[in-house]
Amino acid sequence: MKRLWLGFAAVMILSFMVLGWIGTRIYQEMPPIPDKYVTSDGVTLIDSGEVGEGQNVWQSLGGMQVGSIWGHGSYVAPDWTADWLHREAIFILDKWATAEFSKPYEDLGEEYQGQLVGRLSKLMHTNTFDESTGVVTIDPIRAEAFDSNVEHYETVFIDGNADYAIPANTISSKERVRKFSAFVFWTSWAASTTRPNDIASYTNNWPHEPLVGNRPTGDNIVWTGVSVIMLLAGISGMAWWYASRREEEEKPEGIASHDPLARWQATPSQKATVKYFWVVAALIFAQMSLGIVTAHYGVEGEGFYGFPLAEYLPYSVSRTWHVQIGLFWIATAWLAAGLFIGPLVSNHEPKFQRLGVNVLFGALLLVVVGSLAGEWLSVKHFMSDTVSFYLGHQGYEYVELGRVWQLGLMVGLLLWLVLMLRVLWPALRGMTSSSLGEERVERTGSAGTPLSGSPSLATIDSSGGKVNLVEADSQRHLVILLAVATGAIALFYGAGLTWGQHSHLTMVEYWRWWVVHLWVEGFFEVFATTVIAFVFMRLGLVRPGLAAAAALLSATIFLSGGIIGTLHHLYFSGTPTVALAWGSVFSALEVVPLTLIGFDAMEDLRRSKASPWVQRYKWPIYFFVSVAFWNMIGAGLFGFMINPPIALYYMQGLNTTPLHGHAALFGVYGMLGIGLMLMCLRVLIPGRPWKDGMLAFGFWGMNVGLMAMCVLSLLPVGLLQTKASVETGYWFARSSEFMQTDLMQTLRWMRVPGDTIFFFGAVALVWFVFGLWTGHSFSKKTDGFDPPEQDGANKFDEQTETEKRESVLA
């Protein structure tokens, strides 16, 4: 274990050193925000501060939920960077063609078209930024193109555009449209202007736009090759290592004849977590409903089957809520699982733990309701840009909630950290070398004292006997890893507080992906792996030594690629080539452990059949198996499909992105949250069998529906968009001219079968969970897997078993 801890520490320290060093490089080399844009004949096109003001306009109207910038955002409206760049290019080419050849550019022969394109490429790529004055000097014809594009955006954002799902008055005035245009112009300027002492633009020549000479760089191709080689090398090394370890795996000496947790009596704080799970079920239903509405806006941009829903719930709000509620319920399920598992780990209930759990619940409800309301008020123009940043909509995908609500969530996470550490502390403190194997606790039932009904993890094995020093030490390592993951979850969300209202977009992207990638995909995964290991260990399905080593090794392997792999989101966000190089290599390594994840899934399935009583935990285990499946498909297959630089160059922001997003976010983290919730609810009242018909339908419905959604719609739409991006240009792949064709509309409608199956599966799950509240999800029969009644610690008190279970649900 010492070597594993050293490896874990080395990975953490070295990875964050590299990530921090690249962050400094990004800060030093990010695209400048000029003070002014002035034409060569002295006319000021964009004045001081207008780019930043335009960014704030963009944020308040929904930001990344209304189209995208630099490929990051939503998918119905265009990518504004690519859209502006193409419209500007066409305007200038037509202007030149009309002046020199008396016909539009499109009617010219290839030779003359090539002549004009070469001239335009030089015009657009020449860097005229004067660092001493902060002024960019541009050709007057670009100012004419600017005014033309502003007129177009006035029709889009003031009059509305159904193809883009943008309702009328999305931007309230022409003055604000012009400021928004100034910001979009800056993003396109950065995308087409050559970086000093380089041959590519500030965004590594993204987006693909042949008219201005934006094509893949040599670095895109070379580092794609390196990433594929690293992937193959990593898979080979992992396979050899795994084969060498197969004979060394520990197996339980024997599976108990009865459920070891059957006589566990829920603590007051565990009972208090039940309401978290009711809220999780309600939020799942809300998110799925909003998902149907959001997807439908892609084919009917003004409403929902004829009803003018966009007047009350614009696409930008429905998608914001769909994303935010998904994150809220997944995080709530995980946080509640941590609070529930704490007493099982330490066999201890601290004083006032239930009060803390209740206070945290209220704080989370306040953040959820307040942030969702603020986002709607911001988009509907009830807030100024400054107020919107703090109470409304920040505009950045996954972290849309206003800064005040962000701070509230951060305070809630810190409170959760305190609650977790105080319940884990006795397990850490009690596992000293002087007390290991000697201490045996008795239950008194009072707060702040050890509990009865289940033996202490530090000293007792699954059958009730004392464990040896090695097993107790292994348990201690598992508790330490759980404490580390808990601290990381609480503290790393703070990365989302590092930017302000006027921060540079490139640096916002750098820190935003710390939250999205490191917080969710990194440390939450370590936390969940450790919690699952604890549960299986308590059930006697895995030995402590194997559980601790496997959890620590898994954390080390995932983070070795995951921390630096964060940079694969930043290839084309105004970052230097160093981010592309490191990000491509280490994002490939992220896929390596996923290639062998099927072994873990099959091991989980074998555990579910280890003894008849384990069938009680069948469905939580099945959800854990589905996590492994979607990790392999969603994160591994669909993730690596878009992660190499040359692939992402053409695919970023196309439907290949939500393909990966849905399969990985819900398939992995959503299914994991549901599995943890069901495991906690199963342990809460272990002796009463479930009616699992609705649960079975929910499980298969969500998994089959998610797969159908992916393969019938998102995948073919994304691949056809990629073809259009390669052959014509990125702007075309995102344009209404392409997306509104009969074929693409048919494929978008093909989401309906999968979405419908998925929705009814989610409804069945929600119905089952609420049935545990009302009692209709419990069977009247017993399964006969409870251990015999025992005198002393495990003996029930004067309440009958039924009364006790009913009181827990109440």
Image (cartoon, helix red, strand yellow):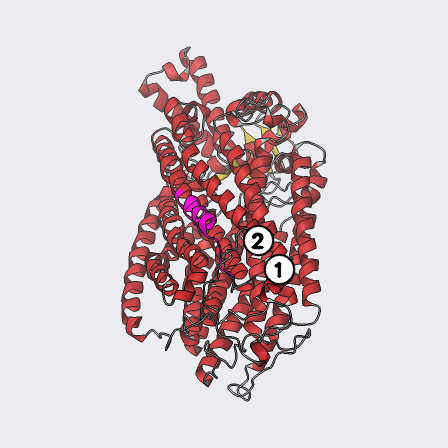
Q: Secondary structure at mark 2?
A: loop
In the rendered image, residue 509, in percent from the top left (x then y), is placed at 54, 47
Q: Which residues are magenta?
A: 688-704
Which amino acid does the dot numbered 2 rest on?
A: Gly
Residue 775: which disc?
2
In the rendered image, residue 317, in percent from the top left (x then y), is placed at 60, 35
The N terminus: image quadrant: bottom left
Q: Looking at the image, is 478 positioned above or below residue 75?
A: below
Side of 690 relative to 151 (left or right): left
Q: Pointers 2 and 1 in contact (CB under 8 A)?
A: yes
Query: Quick one: 595 or 208, which is closer to the camera?
Result: 595
Report crowding for label 1: few under 14, some 14 to 19, many 20 or more residues within 10 A (C-alpha). some
Q: Is residue 760 visible?
A: yes
> In percent of the image, x 62 and y 59: which residue is there?
806
> In percent of the image, x 66 and y 28: which residue is there?
176
In the rendered image, residue 521, in percent from the top left (x then y), is placed at 48, 55
Q: Looking at the image, is 290 positioned above or below residue 259?
A: above
Q: Looking at the image, is 807 positioned above or below residue 735?
A: below
Report crowding for label 2: few under 14, some 14 to 19, many 20 or more residues within 10 A (C-alpha). some
**Prevailing SS of the magenta stretch:** helix
